[in-house]
């Protein structure tokens, strides 16, 4: 299996601030790769560099064998992306948003119409396809964005917090389809998420990033074993020293943290 | 080419679907047409200038195009703020195609608004000198629209502040409009004003349009066309350059 994403010694500085600090990883074709970290860890900055939106300060990136800084068109043809924030035109209908995307990506007319209908049906919006996006709920917009990212049959799918704001049923539905795409069509998936249970269940491999540095990388089971944790969330806390969303840490997170501190103190 | 077409079509759909925008942007041209056209009409005729309405109408049409074209730049800020710009910037098309599509769309919308104002002027009593010159008028309307949409694109690409954009553009648009030949003839102006008016690209647009619609040129059709075309090319290049530098 070939490497679809290869990152070597990647750095991104904003003035004095180092958002991504010498990270390296590879993602093999057909694998689902989870990129986990708290807010501000450098996940979105990394995705932006992988998807040609941002130039790195230094380091080397290859996406589908192409350099995003020099071969932007080839890289862009290779991937579909769901951004962290909405990127639909509210003044257009769902069909028009999909059609616009298909034309920008050069999908032929017949195939475009067929795939738009198929994908919109898949995300459960078939009966709302002619409605303006401004009449959609947040969850519906998210589902439409996932459908849009898949329209041009990308080899790689970048998903930046793709299931945020979705109900559990739709989340499961979307992840099942993404797993199916990965298994049957060899689509490589690179995603970030705050839902650790999703990462645990879906990812073949995860990398944990904190303060711009990758602190651990491997299969979820291997990380759990390495940190002697029952869940990936506990493994994450063990590796980074804090919960995934520190500012939103629940009382359970805080109790887990205290538990780890006490257990650590006891071992010393 | 398909990318240019679809992005241009998007601008047109957004325009057609917003009756408030169509009607709202007619207010100012109608106000100028009624207040100045009828207010100064008799004075202009007594001074031997002929029908002021026939003189003023091309200026008012240019005004409608100018305002709509320049303010189309805010859509870049809007798209950046609400995320749609990202969708276009990661697509496998060049930034040049994106900026051309957007600018062309903005220019056609501004032209359409100019055409609506032209119809209102006709209702108010404006008479086109020769229908044979209508295609020439359309060319000048398009050049005015493209030139000022390019300015809007350049400013919209640099600015990220949605509140700041209208303030800056008003600061730019008002002198452009008042120091052009939209409201008064060029002959007999004080020297300083003559220089200011001569340096203003809108002057050549209004003059070309006035020549095509009312058969009155201050310069010549060729001069107006050449000056406007060169300036449009330069400003389109500047707008494209700033758009290509956008980082999300």
Image: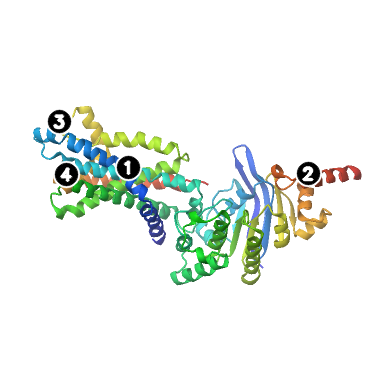
Residue at the location (35% across, 43% down)? B70
Find residue B140 and report its horizontal and vertical position in percent. Answer: 24, 49
How far apart are the alpha carbons under marks 2 and 1?
Answer: 57 Å
Measure the C-alpha gap from mark 1 to mark 3. Answer: 27 Å
Check residue B220 in the rendering and tell me which mark sits there, or answer none.
4
Q: Nearer the viewer, mark 4 or mark 1?
A: 1
At numbered mark 2, what does the secondary structure look like: helix, strand or loop? helix
Mark closer to the observer (3, 2) = 2
Query: Is residue A64 at all visible to an observer of this figure?
Result: no
The answer to whether tags 2 and 1 share a subunit is: no
Mark 4 vs mark 3: in front: 3
Q: Which mark identifies residue B55?
A: none
Residue sitting nearer the eye, A21 or A97: A97
Q: For mark 3, what is the residue? A: B188
Mark nearer the viewer, 2 or 4: 2
Q: In terms of sequence position, does the residue under pointer 4 or pointer 1 come before the other?
A: 1
Q: Is residue B24 visible?
A: yes
Residue occupying image coordinates x 48% and y 62%: A98
Where residue A195 sits, quadrant-wise, is bottom right
Question: What is the spatial separation of the Cα atoms under label 4 and label 3, in whole angstroms?
Answer: 18 Å
Image location of residue A129, percent across then percent down = 49, 64
- Disc 4 and disc 1: Cα gap in Å? 25 Å
Q: Which dot, 1 or 3, sits closer to the camera?
A: 1
On the rendered structure, is A9 left or right of A116? right
Location of the C terminus of chain A by quadrant is top right
User: Mark 1 — residue?
Assistant: B67
Disc 4, disc 3: CB below 8 Å?
Answer: no
Can you say whether A133 is above or below A108 in the image?
Answer: above
Q: Are discs 4 and 1 both within one chain?
A: yes
Which quarter of the rendered picture does the N terminus of chain A lie within? bottom right
The residue under the point 26% across, 43% down is B62
């Amino acid at each position: 299996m070939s490497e679809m994403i290869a990152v070597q010694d990647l750095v991104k500085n904003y003035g004095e601030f180092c958002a991504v600090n010498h990270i390296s990883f590879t993602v093999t074709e057909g694998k689902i790769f989870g990129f986990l970290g708290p807010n501000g860890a450098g996940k979105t900055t990394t995705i932006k560099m992988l998807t040609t939106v941002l130039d790195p300060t230094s380091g080397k990136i290859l996406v589908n064998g192409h350099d995003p800084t020099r071969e932007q068109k080839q890289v862009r043809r290779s991937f579909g992306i769901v951004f962290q924030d909405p990127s639909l035109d509210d003044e257009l209908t769902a069909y028009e948003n999909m059609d616009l995307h298909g034309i920008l990506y050069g999908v032929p007319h017949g195939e475009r119409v067929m795939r738009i209908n198929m994908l919109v049906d898949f995300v459960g919006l078939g009966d709302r396809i002619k409605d303006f996006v401004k009449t959609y709920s947040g969850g519906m917009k998210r589902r439409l964005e996932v459908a849009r990212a898949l329209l041009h049959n990308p080899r790689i799918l970048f998903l930046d917090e793709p299931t945020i704001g979705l109900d559990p049923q739709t989340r499961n539905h979307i992840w099942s389809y993404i797993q199916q795409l990965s298994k049957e069509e060899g689509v490589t998936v690179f995603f970030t998420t705050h839902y650790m249970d999703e990462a645990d269940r879906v990812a073949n491999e995860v990398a944990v990033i904190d303060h711009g540095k990758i602190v651990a990388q491997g299969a979820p089971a291997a990380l759990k074993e390495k940190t002697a944790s029952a869940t990936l969330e506990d493994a994450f806390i063990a590796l980074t020293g804090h919960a995934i969303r520190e500012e939103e840490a629940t009382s359970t997170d805080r109790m887990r943290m205290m538990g780890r501190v006490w257990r650590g103190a006891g071992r010393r | 080419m398909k990318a240019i077409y679809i992005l241009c079509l998007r601008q047109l759909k957004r325009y057609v679907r917003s009756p408030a925008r169509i009607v709202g942007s007619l207010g100012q041209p109608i106000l100028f047409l009624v207040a100045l056209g009828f207010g100064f009409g008799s004075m202009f005729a007594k001074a031997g200038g002929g029908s002021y309405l026939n003189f003023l109408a091309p200026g008012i049409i240019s005004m409608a195009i100018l305002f709509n074209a320049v303010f189309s730049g805010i859509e870049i800020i809007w798209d950046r703020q609400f995320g749609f710009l990202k969708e276009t910037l990661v697509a496998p098309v060049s930034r040049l195609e994106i900026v051309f599509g957007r600018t062309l769309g903005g220019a056609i919308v501004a032209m359409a608004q100019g055409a609506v104002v032209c119809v209102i002027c006709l209702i108010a009593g404006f008479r086109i000198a020769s229908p044979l010159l209508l295609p020439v008028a359309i060319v000048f309307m398009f050049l005015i629209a493209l030139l000022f949409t390019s300015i809007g694109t350049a400013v919209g690409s640099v600015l990220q502040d949605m509140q700041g954009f209208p303030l800056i553009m008003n600061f730019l648009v008002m002198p452009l409009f008042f120091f052009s030949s939209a409201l008064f003839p060029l002959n007999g102006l004080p020297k300083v004003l003559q220089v200011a008016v001569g340096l203003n690209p809108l002057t050549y647009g209004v003059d070309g349009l006035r020549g095509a619609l009312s058969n009155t040129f201050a310069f010549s059709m060729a001069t107006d066309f050449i000056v406007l075309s060169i300036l449009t090319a330069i400003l389109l290049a500047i707008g494209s350059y700033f758009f290509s530098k956008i980082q999300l």
